[in-house]
Amino acid sequence: MTSTLLKSPRLCAPKICHLPNGLTIIAEQMPVEAVNLSLWVPVGSTAESDDINGMAHFLEHMIFKGTQRLASGEFESRIEQRGAVTNAATSQDYTHYYITTAPDDFAKLAPLQVDVVMNATIPDDAFERERLVVLEEIRRSEDNPRRRIFTKTMETAFEKLPYRRSVLGPESVISQLKPQQMRDFHATWYQPKSITAVAVGNLPAEELIEIIAEGFTRNSSNQQLTPPLGKILHPEPAFTEIVRREFTDESLTQARLLMLWRVPGLTELPETYALDVLSGILGQGRTSRLIRDLREERGLVSSISVSNMTNLLQGTFYIAANLPVENIPVVEEAIAEHIRQFQTELVKKSEITRMQKRVANRFIFANETPSDRAGLYGYYHSLVGDLEPAFNYATTIQAIDANDIILAAQKYLSPEAYGVVVIKPGNG
């Protein structure tokens, strides 16, 4: 049954269709001469046990290694022959596959995308070859200073939640995985009832839905396994003290200071909005407080940024600075003092308005292409089960006021209890 989600004039007006096999299709016509098909599978590294950590990402590689109908490499070849593009990504909470085609090619290419995602055969020989590729990707990641720093930060942010682990998994685990383990993982999680298929582009929504529905009817495998009863995961409590970890990194020329707090995730979505605004006021744009104070006026850091990173189960409020080693203590204390101000002083209306305009513009700019819009719909429906937060985000941000911000700071951002990671250059 298809229903129009649009209840009042607004930027987006997709149709949602729920098929008897459990598949959700979201489709929207957009007057741009392209069509994007995005398939969202709500399984990433958080669904893995420690002994298969990295399986979701490894599987993303193997999806393109052939089906009963398509030989390895044939999917990409047929996509490229028509000037279309394809790609995929794996995160902690989801895996995402997409193609972007000309409207005239969509009916031919969309079923191929469904086939490779749903019917991957995962041959033993291709598995062994691709294992080497994934292992090399892990080694390159470990050689990347930014990746190393992020890994150390997430290990500090979470003691138990799987967000502390790498999406790629460790070399020791990947080297031991078996092809049948991957086939079972695929049969467990890659089922129509788990998938959100989103198509946006210059074809009627009804036609997009029909093409996708037919593709899944023709290409869905009968082999389905029941997901295992894993541990029930709960958000971790806030820090009760300053938890400090220090490292050295020979590749750095400046130190890194990272301060973080555990904050709500998508399971507590209303709690995240004020923190989004707060992060912008604190450290996004040249007129934000930390950039103006610590970089522009006092010259204590070469760069500083703030983000409210929202995962499904739990997020992190994250402040990162590049700075000389000798400035670390004064910068850490200055950041803590800025947090104190948010807890005790109402934010100026002008600061809130700046952020609200920034958010509204970003929302509009991020909806200009079929792939942008399909990504927005897929992300929210796959993880939250609802599109309304995608539509209402900018409006919700407009409603945030100074009281909301002070309450969020008091509730979630303690200047006396947080995680901090310091990484000094090798000679620091």
Image (cartoon, rainbow, N blue to C red):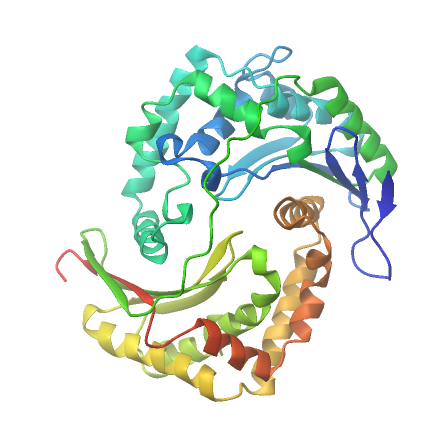
Could you say which quadrant of the image residue 162 lies in?
top left
Relative to 383, 20 lies left or right: right
Relative to 46, 320 lies left or right: left
Which residue is rendered at x = 57% and y = 34% of the image?
87
Asked if 221 appears above or below 360 in the picture, the reply is: above
Which residue is rendered at x = 53% and y = 79% of the image?
407
Relative to 120, 103 lies left or right: right
Residue 309 image point, x, y percent: 48, 59
Give 10 or 100, whichever is nearer the viewer: 10
Asked if 291 appears above or below 45 in the picture, the reply is: below
Evaluate whether residue 99 shows in this view. Answer: no
Give 193 or 289, whichever is nearer the viewer: 193
Give 414 or 247, whichever is nearer the viewer: 414
Residue 423 image point, x, y percent: 23, 59
Could you say which quadrant of the image residue 115 lies in?
top right
Asked if 31 appears above or below 174 in the picture, the reply is: below
Give 377 or 425, whichever is nearer the viewer: 377
Could you say which quadrant of the image residue 237 lies in?
bottom left
Residue 417 image point, x, y percent: 33, 72
Which residue is rendered at x = 41% and y = 33% of the image?
54
Q: Quadrant of the C terminus?
A: bottom left
Asked if 29 appears above or below 342 in the picture, the reply is: above
Relative to 415, 230 lies left or right: right
Evaluate whether residue 357 shows in this view. Answer: yes
